Image (tube, rainbow, N blue to C red):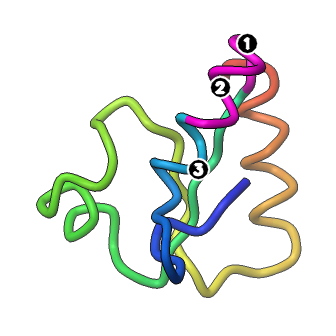
Amino acid sequence: MTDVVMPEMNGRDLAEQLVRGNPGLKRLFMSGYTANIIAHHGVLDKDVQFIQKPFSPRNPAAKVWAVMHDA
């Protein structure tokens, strides 16, 4: 789970580096920006798992479960 916008490296670049060493790695991105804005700027692909901030404590747990179980 990584933020989309970070200093010096965006979340997509981080995920790409991590997947090279762990090909089956599941990824979940988060951002305070809406998914539409993130997609419009080409930061994330359409099939990427995304959760928008702010979120309640239950939201990320449910989203992580769904990503881990390909739901």
Query: Where residue 52 sits in the image (x, y, percent)?
Result: 52, 71
Which residue in the structure is indicated by mark 1? 24
Mark 3 or mark 1, earlier in chain: 3
Residue at the front extreme? 8
Q: Quadrant of residue 51?
A: bottom right
Q: Amino acid at mark 3?
A: Leu
| Residue located at (57% from left, 55% from top) | 29
Quadrant in which the N terminus is drawn: bottom right
Q: Secondary structure at mark 2?
A: helix
What is the crowding at mark 3: few (fewer than 14 residues within 10 Å), some, or many (at least 20)?
A: some
Q: CA distance from mark 2 to mark 1?
A: 7 Å
Query: Where residue 41 sits in the image (x, y, percent)?
Result: 15, 63
Which residue in the structure is indicated by mark 2? 19
Q: Secondary structure at mark 1?
A: loop
* Residues at circles 2 and 3 in contact by the CB criterion of under 8 Å: no
* Residues at circles 3 and 1 in contact by the CB criterion of under 8 Å: no
Between residue 21 and residue 62, name the one nearer to us.
21
What is the crowding at mark 2: few (fewer than 14 residues within 10 Å), some, or many (at least 20)?
A: some
**Magenta stretch, residue numbers:** 17-25
Quadrant in which the C terminus is drawn: top right
Q: Amino acid at mark 1?
A: Gly
Q: Amino acid at mark 2?
A: Val
Q: Secondary structure at mark 3?
A: helix
Which residue in the structure is indicated by mark 3? 14
